[in-house]
Amino acid sequence: MPTQFKLEDTQSALLDLLVAGLASYGEMVDVSPVSQRNFDAEGNLVAVPPAVLLLFETETPQPLGQDMTRTTYQMEQAFTLICGDTDLRSSAAESRSVLQLVSTVKNVVMGARLAITSDWKAEPIEYRGVDLFQVDQRATWYGVRFAVPCTAQFTGGS
């Protein structure tokens, strides 16, 4: 049976993984997909920290081997987890707090095999790095970048 590796299924599995993995974090973390509600009119991120926001970036397909029908691909779905936290005690405390959240998120996600269906798991998640996303009066935000590699098979339009 073809496995299309749909983006909505990958996103759902990632959110489930994060919610379960952050359940024991020191404080309640808002885990959700990015939406237009997370940005103001100037394009600045607005969310209540601590938060981890899941952002889909790209999907890159490569045809596999001698598949003349072009229905089987090695896929890579790239995501960024935007991690943010704040601590009003001091700049050092805020930096420590957000970096602790980033480290926890990396530990939860890296190398995990997403359960896409009850009997099928994706290949292990590949870590791509961390970038500063945004710093403002509300919080400090970092983006944890990673990719979910998989083999996707489609039925084709023949």
Image (cartoon, rainbow, N blue to C red):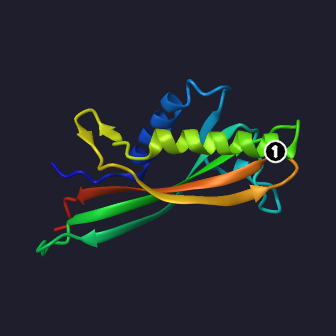
Q: Provide residue 76's location: percent of width, then percent of height.
A: 36, 62
Image location of residue 136, percent across then percent down: 84, 54
Quadrant in the rendering for residue 65: bottom left
Above or below, 140 against 120 in this view is: below
**Which secondary structure lies at badge 1?**
helix
Please tell me which residue lies in front, 113 or 6.
Answer: 113
Instruction: Provide the residue designation for mark 1.
Output: 92
For the image, the number of numbered tags is: 1
Q: Is residue 64 left or right of residue 11?
A: left
Residue drawn at x 36%, y 52% as measured from the top left: 6
Q: Residue at x 25, y 58 (%)?
A: 152
Which of the pair 50/102 is nearer the observer?
102
Residue 52, visible in the rendered structure: no
Q: What percent of the width, then of the height, locates residue 137?
A: 88, 50
The kind of residue tagged 1 is Ala
Quadrant containing the C terminus is: bottom left
Q: Give left or right: position of 3 versus 102.
A: left
Could you tell me if residue 4 is visible in this image? Answer: yes
Neighbours of disc 1 within 10 Å: few (<14), some (14-19), many (20+): few
Which residue shows up at 60% across the image and 28% down it?
25
Towards the viewer: 50 or 57: 50
Residue 157 point in image, percent of width and height: 21, 66
Q: Is residue 10 above or below residue 63?
A: above
Q: Is residue 12 above or below residue 55?
A: above
Say which residue appears at 80% left-offset and 55% top-offset.
40
Question: Residue lying furthest front in this view?
Answer: 92
